[in-house]
């Protein structure tokens, strides 16, 4: 086959206390169509980022695909790529992680006749490009993922989220630079805050997998959100107001979007109503957890 379609979910990383470790795949998708052509490179971007995303060799989907080919010492094919982007850019929903995962998956599909890439290899390539595995792990594999790095490279564990968990993502009009958000982190944190986050991270895994009623306490954080609040005051204000009302709200990824992890669809509707009244410029995305992760389908040509 010389035509492929890859579908990649949005992701939310950190989930409150699980900084650079926890991530979740969400039912909101980018799709990328690839066709092998005789020569050159053609890239078209539709939807989110249509006016801003690169359409040359620096395009993140293409450069990620190329990274795999070069690493395996294979000839990079001439391709045409059409990006159908729905995931908001610069909003903490893993748009770059989706592009990286999509490019790696397309490379795996093109190389399948010669090399069968393992899940571990997919994660390693994606982490090499993205820099850390917390977004690319759920983008690749779906579900709730715990990601870490040891002497052998990046690792992940996929978990199934309790069916009672009802995710909601609240998206503002403005963007946030992940680089800027990371620059606001201190080099060290108080001992008490570190212990606090260890306890909440452990509790969060239990809450998401087994006991959703604990999500409000489990999503408390002292490691990163407070330090980044100055760069996105409206996000911080929204989170504070939602949490005062009992909604488990956190910064989604590096922000400025807000992730709310409710344990009841009725509570999610109440949160949506509150945001519509108090923060009318924010968009509410009522989502589910994606359990499949990135997928690739071979496409039959038209014969023309």
Image (tube, rainbow, N blue to C red):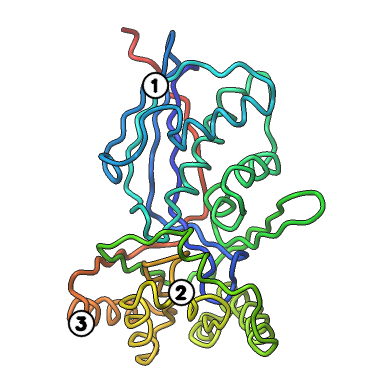
Residue marked by disc 2: 228
Q: How far apart are the alpha carbons under marks 1 and 2?
A: 39 Å
Q: Tag 2 or tag 1, which sits nearer the N-term?
A: 1
Relative depth, front residue between 168 and 180: 180
> Up-down: is 243 above or below 250?
below
- Mark in the foreground, 1 or 2: 2
Q: Tag 3 or tag 2, which sits nearer the N-term?
A: 2
> Up-down: is 194 above or below 63?
below
| Element type where label 3 sits in the image | helix
Mark sitting on residue 202: none
| Element type where label 2 sits in the image | helix
Q: How far apart are the alpha carbons under marks 2 and 3?
A: 22 Å
Task: Give the x, y percent position of residue 264.
Answer: 39, 79
Residue 147 is left or right of residue 53, and the answer is right
Residue lying at 46% horizontally and 74% vertically, measured from the top left: 228
Residue marked by disc 1: 80
Task: Give the x, y percent position of residue 115.
Answer: 69, 24
Residue marked by disc 3: 278
> Up-down: is 25 above or below 282?
above
Crowd rating for badge 2 (residues with CA inside 10 Å; few <14, some 14–19, many 20+): many
| Element type where label 1 sits in the image | strand
Task: Give the x, y percent position of residue 240.
Answer: 37, 86
């Amino acid at each position: 086959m010389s035509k492929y379609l890859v579908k990649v979910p949005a992701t939310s990383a950190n989930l409150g206390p699980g900084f650079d470790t926890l991530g979740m795949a969400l039912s909101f998708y980018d799709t990328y169509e690839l066709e092998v052509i005789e020569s050159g490179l053609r890239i078209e971007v539709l939807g989110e980022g249509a006016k801003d995303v690169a359409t040359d060799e620096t395009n993140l989907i293409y450069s990620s695909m190329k990274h795999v080919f070069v690493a395996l010492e294979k000839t990079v094919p001439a391709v045409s790529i059409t990006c159908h982007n729905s995931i908001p850019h610069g909003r903490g929903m893993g748009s770059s992680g989706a592009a990286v995962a999509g490019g790696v998956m397309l490379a795996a599909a093109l190389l399948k006749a010669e090399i069968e890439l393992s899940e571990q290899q997919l994660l390693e390539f994606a982490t090499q490009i993205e820099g850390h595995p917390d977004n690319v792990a759920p983008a690749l594999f779906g579900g709730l993922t715990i990601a870490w790095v040891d002497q052998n490279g990046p690792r992940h564990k996929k978990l199934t989220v309790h069916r009672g968990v009802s995710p909601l993502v609240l998206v503002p009009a403005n963007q946030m630079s992940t680089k800027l958000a990371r620059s606001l982190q201190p080099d060290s944190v108080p001992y008490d805050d570190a212990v606090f986050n260890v306890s909440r991270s452990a509790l969060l895994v239990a809450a998401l997998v087994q006991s959703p009623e604990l999500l409000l306490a489990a999503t408390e954080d002292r490691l990163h959100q407070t330090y980044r609040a100055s760069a996105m005051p409206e996000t911080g204000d929204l989170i504070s107001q939602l949490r005062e009302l009992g909604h488990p709200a956190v910064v989604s990824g590096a922000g400025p979007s807000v992730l709310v992890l409710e344990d009841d669809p009725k509570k999610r509707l109440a949160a949506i109503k509150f945001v519509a009244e108090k923060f009318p410029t924010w968009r509410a995305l009522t989502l589910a957890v994606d359990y499949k992760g990135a997928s690739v389908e071979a496409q039959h040509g038209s014969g023309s």
